[in-house]
Image (cartoon, rainbow, N blue to C red):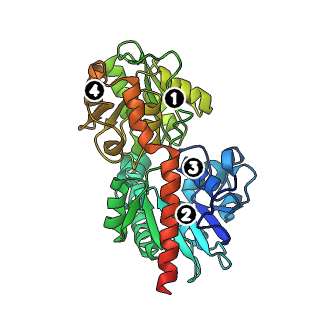
């Protein structure tokens, strides 16, 4: 059977992504878009070979000059002040449709006046707007560096706002991010939840109707980039207070500090393959999410495997976790509050099947249909106004 026509068929299309450095939530969305738009090249600031998996394998990847700077593969964030100039250098003269997935600079590419630009926005630039202390506060980088960086990030915030008109239509990965887009860019955004591979992330064959995610005998799990705003330190302290073993999946610049905080009951696995991750979700007594997430794919993957979630009651988690049913939303960002939530998990009324049903609301086919509809509406609106 022939593939159905898509709004981008026959149009010169490019996909723009901030950076390709590993299988995090944003790159899972990118993978889904690449599957929908199979022939479009991907433009990115910097790329690591190990990140080119799935739909990115064999894809034409065009990188920026940052790719050729020292240590760019691991320390690309240190080139942040260069991002505005570099992202604007990509040549889009012959492009009719730009699709960007952006949490930093990708949305600021410069299309021609005739091109349509649809941006899937994971968040306006966090560190430039409301999370400067988490990344560049004095306790992170020292008093002098923090003071020196503050005007730089203020300038980046102004640039971030000024480049928003380059986008024809925004999609936000949650209602929470749509609110941030309205607040910082003065733009409306269509809420389009990211796709979660609910066909792969499933309960194990040994799970019964109620499952075996027993709060008393399992372990707590964190699946996250190890960056300051994720507040993994809270998860480490909470698990210690509750007397739970903790397993942490992920890598990032905060790894050394977090290892120094962790005791012998904390295991750092780094990045793991999908099969291992699924097995961890199936065996964990809870996924812990102490940071304020824009959406958070890991909680939905965990729910799809029947694993309950303990998350901060802010941001995207409030849209994915049913408090007191599929998990517990914690109103206070403290180790004591998260430890108390871990102790209450055994009283949740939901079964493995209930939690999986919650996750199915974020299945890939919903994203695919919504994304195609958004691009169609945007193209039709642009041509109708010409």
User: Which comes sooner in the sequence, label 2 or label 1?
Assistant: 2
Q: Residue 369 at what x, y percent from top left?
A: 51, 55
Q: Residue 314 at what x, y percent from top left?
A: 29, 45
Give the answer, above or below, for where 99 lies relative to 114: above
Distance between the alpha carbons at the discs numbered 3 and 2 = 12 Å
Report whether residue 92 is seen: yes
Tell me the residue at 42%/61% (across/down).
124
Residue closest to the eye, 329 or 201 = 201
Q: Residue 303 at what x, y percent from top left?
A: 42, 32
**Helix, strand or loop status at disc 2:** strand
Residue closest to the eye, 146 or 292 = 292
- Left or right: residue 301 compared with residue 35: left
Tell me which corner region of the image, top left, top right, bottom left or bottom right, holds residue 188.
bottom left
**Helix, strand or loop status at disc 1:** loop
Tell me which corner region of the image, top left, top right, bottom left or bottom right, holds residue 362.
top left
Q: Which residue is mark 1?
A: 202
- Left or right: residue 236 compared with residue 91: left
Distance between the alpha carbons at the discs numbered 2 and 1 = 30 Å
């Amino acid at each position: 059977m022939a593939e159905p026509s898509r709004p981008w068929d026959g149009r010169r299309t490019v996909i723009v992504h901030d950076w390709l450095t590993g299988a995090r939530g944003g790159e899972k969305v990118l993978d889904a878009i690449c599957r929908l738009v199979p022939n479009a090249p991907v433009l990115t600031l910097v790329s690591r070979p190990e990140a080119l998996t799935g739909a990115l394998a064999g894809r034409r990847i065009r990188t920026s000059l940052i790719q050729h700077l020292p240590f760019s593969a691991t320390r690309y964030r240190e080139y942040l002040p260069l991002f505005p100039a570099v992202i604007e250098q990509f040549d889009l003269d012959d492009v009719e449709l730009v699709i960007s997935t952006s949490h930093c600079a990708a949305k600021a590419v410069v299309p021609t006046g005739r091109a349509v630009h649809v941006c899937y926005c994971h968040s306006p630039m966090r560190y430039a707007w409301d999370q400067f202390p988490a990344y560049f506060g004095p306790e992170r980088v020292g008093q002098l560096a923090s003071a020196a960086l503050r005007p730089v990030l203020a300038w980046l915030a102004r640039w971030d706002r000024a480049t928003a008109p380059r986008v024809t239509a925004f999609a936000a990965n949650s209602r929470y991010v749509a609110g941030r887009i309205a607040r910082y860019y003065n733009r409306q955004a269509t809420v389009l939840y990211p796709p979660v591979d609910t066909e792969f992330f499933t309960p194990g064959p040994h799970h019964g109707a109620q499952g075996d995610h027993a709060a008393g005998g399992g372990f707590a799990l964190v699946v996250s980039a190890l960056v300051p705003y994720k507040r993994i330190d809270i998860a480490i302290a909470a698990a210690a207070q509750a007397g739970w073993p903790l397993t942490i999946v992920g890598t990032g610049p905060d790894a050394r500090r977090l290892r120094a905080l962790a005791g012998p009951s904390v295991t750092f696995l780094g990045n793991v393959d999908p099969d291992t991750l699924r097995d961890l979700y199936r065996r964990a007594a809870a996924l812990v999410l102490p940071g304020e997430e824009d959406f958070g794919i890991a909680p939905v993957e965990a729910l799809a495997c029947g694993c309950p979630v303990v998350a901060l009651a802010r941001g995207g988690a409030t849209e994915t976790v049913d408090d007191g049913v599929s998990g517990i939303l914690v109103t206070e960002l403290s180790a004591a509050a998260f430890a108390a939530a871990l102790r209450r998990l055994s009283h949740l009324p939901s079964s493995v099947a209930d939690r999986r049903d919650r996750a199915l609301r974020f299945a890939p086919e919903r994203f695919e249909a919504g994304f195609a509809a958004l691009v169609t509406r945007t193209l039709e609106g642009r041509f109708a106004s010409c």
